[in-house]
Image (tube, grey):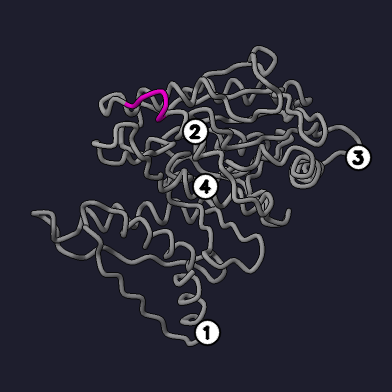
Amino acid sequence: MSVFNESQLEQAFVELLKKEGYDYVHGECITRDTRDVVLYEDLRLYLRKKYKADHITEDEINRAIARLETSDGGGVYAENVEALRLMQEGFSLKRTNPKLPNLHIYPIDYTESGKNNLFKFVNQFAIDGEHHRIPDGIVFVNGLPLVVLEFKNAIKQNTTIENAFKQLTVRYRRDIPKLFRYNAFVVISDGVNNKIGSLFAPYEFFYGWHKVEATDSILDGAFDTMFTMMCGLFRRDRLLDVLHNFIFLPDTPKGEDKIMCRYPQYFATTQLFNNILKHSRLNPDGDGKGGTYFGATGCGKSYTMLFLARKLMRSKQLSSPTIVLITDRTDLDDQLSKSFLN
């Protein structure tokens, strides 16, 4: 079995992302201030395309970018929560012409076509913060650094995938905190082991993405998880779906709480949601029988229900439905109510 060194692993990710339709640029080929973490040309281009019909002005583009960058402080976690909510929900922008109504700006195009979005993978992207650091890879969408990837050599002595975790969550977080304002999640890989997780999660909560489609068999062999992660999670529409609907930020966190779905929760939620729409009595052939979902103890059913409820509430077809939760145990009732209230 061949094993990648870090350079080969980096190139393997480049090729897989190119197949998924990402543009690829080496970090040294981008002319920029190394203190900046946003690709401003991409962000400006996206805003011009997305809001061309609204006749967005350059002044409005500048103010939209300033809104995305404006921070209330509070550290890396607070900034990440702030930016993620702007990316998930968008924000209202006053027009230069006061006679025009406010323009609602979405930094990411979540429409079905998503044709305005710009996807780019950049490796060796040097950043100057508290120290000079060069992350192995960054996925940018519309110029915003959504995913940071760190690679390690699987055969190098005294080096494990956990070293990649520490590099991201300790050294990079400390030395280049600006990079993580817009971060959805991070990836750690040695080619054989490939895991995703929140920057704020302990190592044991990092998890592989072992399926491309819900009906696939679970793949967990050497290098299989690299393929299933790239094709199953980094498919462009799916990456945006995860960003929009499958990252949970509590209103009143106990600590640095940020919950990202695991692949069984993603597929369960998506299948449930699609089945509910299919059987809805709003459809001429709908019978109102959305189906039943069985989940084992400890599989994260509560978060699956939370993700599902959010998708149902956002559904234009269902027009803000009433959702009823029924439980058979007091402890589960408490657990669910706290999660949903948050």
Crowd rating for badge 1 (residues with CA inside 10 Å; few <14, some 14–19, many 20+)? few
- Magenta: main secondary structure: helix
User: Which numbered disc covers residue 331?
Assistant: 1
User: Which numbered disc covers residue 173?
Assistant: none
Tell me which numbered mark, 1 or 2, is placed earlier along the sequence.
2
Q: Nearer the viewer, mark 1 or mark 4?
A: 4
Instruction: Tell me the SS state at disc 3.
Output: loop
Q: CA distance from mark 4 to mark 2?
A: 14 Å
User: Is 221 or 35 nearer to us in this picture?
Assistant: 35
Q: Nearer the viewer, mark 2 or mark 3?
A: 2
User: Which numbered disc covers residue 65?
Assistant: 2
The residue range painted magenta reads 56-60
Above or below for 46 versus 158: above
Residue 243 percent across, percent down from the top left: 48, 45
Q: Nearer the viewer, mark 4 or mark 3?
A: 4
* Residue under numbered circle 3: 158
Q: CA distance from mark 2 to mark 3?
A: 43 Å
Report the residue that reaches farthest toward the right. 157
Crowd rating for badge 3 (residues with CA inside 10 Å; few <14, some 14–19, many 20+)? few
Above or below for 325 versus 229: below
| Magenta stretch encompasses residue 197 | no
Residue 101 percent across, percent down from the top left: 26, 40
Report whether 257 appears left or right of 64: right
Q: CA distance from mark 1 to mark 4?
A: 31 Å
Q: CA distance from mark 1 to mark 2?
A: 45 Å
* Residue under numbered circle 4: 84
User: Is 306 or 83 nearer to us in this picture?
Assistant: 83
Q: Hey, what amino acid is under mark 2?
A: Ile
Q: Hey, what amino acid is under mark 4?
A: Leu
Q: Which corner quadrant of the image does residue 51 belong to? A: top left
Q: Hey, what amino acid is under mark 3?
A: Asn
